[in-house]
Image (cartoon, helix red, strand yellow):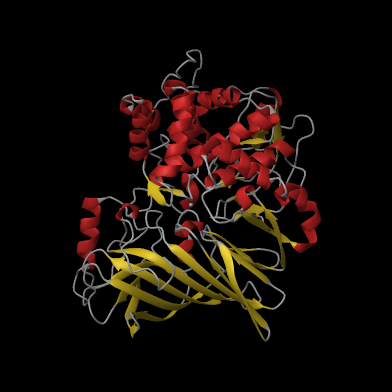
Amino acid sequence: MLLTPRNEARRPVPGAPHSRPRSTRRLRMPALLAVAVSTCLLAASAPATPLGVGDHLYPHLGNPGYDVASYDLSFTYPGTNTKPLKAVTRIDAWTTTDLDRINLDFAHGKVESVEVDGEPASFSSAGEDLVVTPENPLPDGSWTRITVRHSSDPVYGEGQEGGWVRTSDGLAMANQADAAHVVFPCNDHPSDKAMFTIRVTAPNGYTAVANGLRTDVDRAGRTTTWTYRTGHPMATELAQVSIGRSTVLHRTGPHGLPLRDVVPTEHRERLEPWLEKTPGQISWMESKIGRYPFETYGLLMADAATGFELETQTLSLFERELFTGSTFPKWYVESIMVHELAHQWFGDSVSPRTWSDLWLSEGHATWYEALYAAEKAGKPVEARMKAAYAASDRWRAAGGPPAAPKKPEAGKKNGIFRPNVYDGAALVLYALRQEIGRPAFENLEREWVSRHQDGSASTADFIALAEEISGRHLDGFMQAWLYGEKTPPMPGQPEWKAVDPEKKPAKSGKAATAAKTGKAAKTGKAAKTGKAAKAGKAAKTVQTGKTVKTGKSGRTGMTTEPAKTTTTGKVARSAK
């Protein structure tokens, strides 16, 4: 996810596979799983309880006892964003222990019925879990199918972050980090990736697009059903469904890769100059880390003020205004496009094993965003990293070290997307390149995405591979950079200094006045979007088109060039 500096924040084909999925996809937390599974094995008469796989940042996310192989999702859109969609979710999974009950993550919507292997099953809610009790217990190693008929409601209370995004003419999805389960029942954790088939039925005149490639279009009377299927496993937080009065534009990428972009029809011509940049950007990324990992790619330009851009697998979500507005310079918008594209390798193809491993996703996307800006727009990586180094101690104090982020504040589940996992994590990669040398670092990057393609991987996996590729013991070096409270000295740059987080920066002139009033200081022609910053909210500065963020902020994008300010008063977002 990438926060943009305009708005406030609101990560086998079904029925076909009959071989056990790779066990490496499952989260390895033996002690925590043992406790959770023992709870799941309680007698059916015991009260239903919410479970989880023991993720440090989201303790009740995901569920133990089974490994999902595939999802088959069906949504029927009523032609309005104010009414629930009718939905059917079919899950094919292997059990990994004896189960009397099956916990699914599902927190928003009405469940009409549940079947397990074609037989009716009882169900109840416990926290944000849907607890299913089959007529007969499921033994370890069973292939099972769970079918849930339910509603999927795009209307939420004020506290909800993510899920359905209501656009000017339909819907889109933004499920990172833990919101897929407000859209459909699932095992909502990136450690359990699965294949997806997605069907959307909508009134004629609407266009539906989802992850993967389209396999069927069925027009019947006043409705059309669109079917899409992924060619690679996907985490639930990366699911995408677009429903709107849209135009789908097709083009060809490197090696004949089919590309499709989804745009509001009225903005098609204005967006085309941006969209035609994608093939070249894919070629650039392939020159750095190897072949694009999926069956298709494209951009979904949503007519919505989300406050972020999001790397949903094969179809990245963007705010349309990012491209049709005039807030940011061209080079910066292009670097955001590359940030989301880089996520297709880092975060989508190779997913974080736990949410504490988020730095592997956001840090790499930020790194390639910075490299692209350096090569294509002359924005030096070293200048950005030096500025990040100066701020790194503050980021660690506020959000935790890059690989040990602090838990999000109550009611702010997306609060893990702080600068420490964006530029703070990219700074770790820069330090590693300084330490082991450019050739070894570039080999590491290529081997990382190749070895862990279609799976999930951890920080420990990355450290081990870095040692293998470099032929050096790096555990102490990486531990300090990833888990230390203070930023270690930068190899080769002994003059770089971090600002003491205990010291408040001096204020002077207009900046001091702005800080007191809560308004952003203006320099030159300050870009204004949305509402002006209100008192008590920190002004966000855009330095050469990049954002210094606070609160739910993601990236800093700091450079040594003069700062320009934007008085949005809202949180800057970045590509998750």
Task: Establish if 322 lies above or below 70.
Answer: above
On the image, the x and y values in percent for residue 537 come to 60, 41
On the image, the x and y values in percent for residue 62 come to 36, 59
Left or right: 226 as drawn, with respect to 74: right
Left or right: 413 as drawn, with respect to 204: left
- Residue lying at the far front of the rendered structure: 255
On the image, the x and y values in percent for residue 422 come to 51, 37
**Going 70% across and 38% down the picture, which residue do you hit?**
566
**Going 26% across and 71% down the picture, which residue do you hit?**
142
- Residue lying at the far bottom of the rendered structure: 221
**Going 41% across and 54% down the picture, which residue do you hit?**
190
In this rendering, does residue 134 appear at all? yes
Task: Establish if 559 lies above or below 50.
Answer: above
Task: Establish if 413 lies above or below 440.
Answer: below
**Viewer-proximal residue among 296 and 243:** 296
- Residue lying at the far top of the rendered structure: 495
Left or right: 302 as drawn, with respect to 439: right
**Viewer-proximal residue among 201 and 399:** 201
In this rendering, does residue 530 appear at all? no
**Going 73% across and 46% down the picture, which residue do you hit?**
529
